[in-house]
Amino acid sequence: MAATDLTTCTGAPLPVGMRPGALSRPEAQAAAIIAAFLVLRCAAAALIGLGIDESYSVSVARALHLSYFDHPPLQYWMVHAAAPIVGWGQASRIPFLLLFVGTCWLMFLLTRRLFGARAGVWAVLALNLSGFFTLAAASWVLPDGPLDFWLTGAGLALAWGWFEPAAAPADKPAAPLGAWLAVGACIGLAALSKYQAALFCLGLLAFVLTAPGRWRELTRRGPYLAAALTLLVLAPVMVWNARHGWASFAFQGGRGAPNHRLDLSAPLVALAGQAGVLAPWVFVVLAAAAVGALKAGPRDQRRWLCLMLAAPPICVFTLAPLMAKHTLPHWASPGWLMLFPLAGERLAAAAETRAWPRIWAGASAAALVLLGGLFTWDASSGWIGASLTSLGSRSDPTLETLAWTQVREALGARGLLRGEASPVAALRWNDAGKLAIALGGLAPVTVLSPDAREFAYQGDPGRLVGRDVLIVARPGALDESMDDLRPYFRSITPLAPISVGRRGRTEIRLNVAMGHAMLRPYLEGDWARAARSRGGAPASP
């Protein structure tokens, strides 16, 4: 791809003064693509408020633990480590933005090793044109960012261990021990981000068992030392779960468990959801590349490796909805990530003789910028909810990125945040995250709900006994829960509600009440009770 090709792909002119040959090398082209999209992401991250999961993650990361209820600890550790520099808020995204730069570069190196440098440039471009990867995984405070980085690193280590650079006359008969140790460390760190990393191991085993001659790896020490290193890296997760009744494993394992009748249409719906979060224009290219690798079969080991690493997550989370209702489209994203080298090879080969890859790239970039721009504009202004007043503010898809800063202002004006402020309680774990971010540590935040998630493990539940507790809840939630809450307080006094919204509008009206003199600890969540019954202590790190 020449310098003029890059401008055609991205739709953007070269900076003034740049020599035409400055971007002639694939490495420079890949770096330019990464830098350009990083600028766009930084602008979006500054304008889009923290979502529900992000607010929750940042708020619970204030307490440093070996692991956490919802996910393994790496994302929380990242937030906690960066907090002295960036604080506790939107700037917590900075480590995740930078980490995706590394993911993109690892993707370039992986694809270059397998299929050549020009294929690497196309793979990086396709990765940055995909919806979920370029927005959520690339900048939001979620476990997917570190998961993708370390899985790509594991793929690169495998490619380095098994294959000579692209166009080399022969591949390596066996991976050296150093490559296996790198694989083990990367998989361990990926699993320290999200439990889905286990599916990468299934794909790796499938490749070893099906690729000609690769089964001999199982007779060598490398894979077993790699597995031992993975388990060593995962030690904090194992220790935390052992102390807390294996709560995290039970929670995540139950989310995709069968819970309804067989639904034969569900896989198609799941696949459509995956196409939607990836962006349809990227999904089509990835799917075509996967079909091509399947047709080539296991003798084409470079393509087969990518396909086998991709298959388990895609198959599991496409077929799981047959009997499980609770699945999300992005759960399959680690599998699609492993198909980008195949997509890069396919696009690079087609671009040599055809115009459609450049047209596809330009149109995809335009669609991404347009849709991303509209989403960012709405997140900062709420124009959709304001325009569609007949449908109410709930019609706004960015409402949950709204910061609840007015809560802090209103409680401060009422004198409720002075001195040793009363604890603040939400009735849902996701609202607790919003409250914690808004209050900025001025008052402790807890959850009065059987499903408190990580908040059930944040301190001794008895610490609130005898204290007044300020309850903040969404419309209707407080009234619905009042009968359950009354036995825990001497009395409950309703207070004036708090309006939250953008540009002076009321988009959410939060109900407020003061629970006086808490009588006993609130009913603990199922997982916390199980931990205590086994001798664990949810408050312990």
Image (tube, helix red, strand yellow):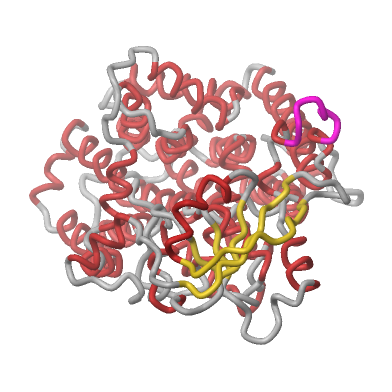
Left-right relation of 539 to 495: left
Residue 68, by quadrant, is bottom left
Q: Which is more toward the observer, 162 or 391?
A: 391
Residue pushed farthest bottom?
Answer: 419
Q: Which residues are magenta?
A: 386-393
Residue 335 seen: yes
Q: Which is the main secondary structure of the residues drawn in magenta?
A: loop
Residue pushed farthest top?
Answer: 264
Left-right relation of 372 to 181: right
Instruction: Please state the horizontal and vertical placement of residue 421, each as a whole percent of the image.
Output: 63, 79
Can you say whether 431 is above or below 82 in the image? above
Which part of the image, by quadrant, shows the C terminus?
Answer: bottom left
Instruction: Please state the horizontal and vertical placement of residue 83, each as a whole percent of the image.
Output: 60, 74
Left-right relation of 95 to 520: right
Instruction: Please state the horizontal and vertical placement of residue 470, each as a whole percent of the image.
Output: 60, 67
Q: Which is more toward the observer, 33 or 502?
A: 502
